[in-house]
Amino acid sequence: MQRARSPENKARRAEDLLRAAEAVALERGGVRYVTLAAVTEQAGLHRTGVRRYYASKEQLLLELAERGWGQWRDAVRKEIAGHTGLTPAQVAAVVSRTLTSLPVFCDLLTHTVLHLEGDVGLERARQYKTAATAARDDIAAAVSRASTLTREQIVSLLAVAGFLAAGFWQVANPTPTLAKLYEEEPGWGYATTDIGPRLDAMLATFAAGLTTTGPPAPEAPIPEP
């Protein structure tokens, strides 16, 4: 296969590899099963070709996670476009719906924290953190304009949403060993269900709590003896 020599072709090949990595993760049941060999085969490249675009599988997956932040931001903006005065429950529903529409991103949120950020160089980690923070801030700014929540409240909601979605995804998509175990012991596999309703309920509760929690009450004075 001919090499991509122009900047445009290189960018297109890099994007092809990202799409291929996402497809492999979806087909095989998670990011943990993604290999560079499978990605290059999916993308129609020679097995060694990926090294011209991504130095390692970790860099490729971190790039995919970075792109996921942008996709989440764009999905939220699209959902709330033209809306004002959204209630905490409505905001929670938007956050949950848009996040669960990106299953590979939910999966990557776990792997990013566990090892991807630490398995790349300092500057690549900085690039990811900068992009992720910017996307989060863009979401918070857009939602604060369209809702009754403050920016600070929305940032808290987004943080909780990310952690819950990451954890729920892992539980709902067990390894083959655990899947077999849950077949034999159905009571242990109660959480291996669609994460959407569970995330909806928890985020709605948390969002409501954000608007009712006030400053801590002052401690009562100790009675004089």
Image: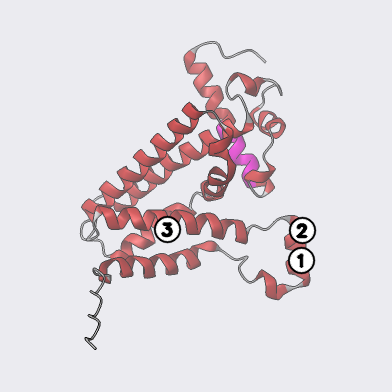
Q: Nearer the viewer, residue 124 or 54?
A: 124
Residue extending furthest top?
5
Question: Looking at numbered disc 1 in the image, what kind of residue is underneath it?
Answer: Leu
In the rendered image, which residue does mark 3 sit on?
Answer: 160
Q: For the N terminus, which image quadrant?
A: top right
Picture coordinates of residue 13, whole percent (x, y) = 56, 23
Q: How would you rate the neighbour count of disc 2 (Cα within 10 Å): few for under 14, some for 14-19, many for 20 or more?
A: few
User: Relative to residue 26, is residue 105 drawn left or right?
Assistant: left
Give the main secondary structure, helix, strand or loop, of the magenta stretch: helix
In the rendered image, which residue does mark 1 sit on?
Answer: 181
Of helix, strand and loop, which one carries label 3?
Answer: helix
Between disc 1 and disc 3, the foreground one is 3
Determine the CA span between mark 1 and mark 3.
30 Å
In the rendered image, which residue does mark 2 sit on?
Answer: 177
Which region shows up in magenta?
Answer: 18-26
Answer with mark 2 or mark 3, whichever residue precedes in sequence. Answer: 3
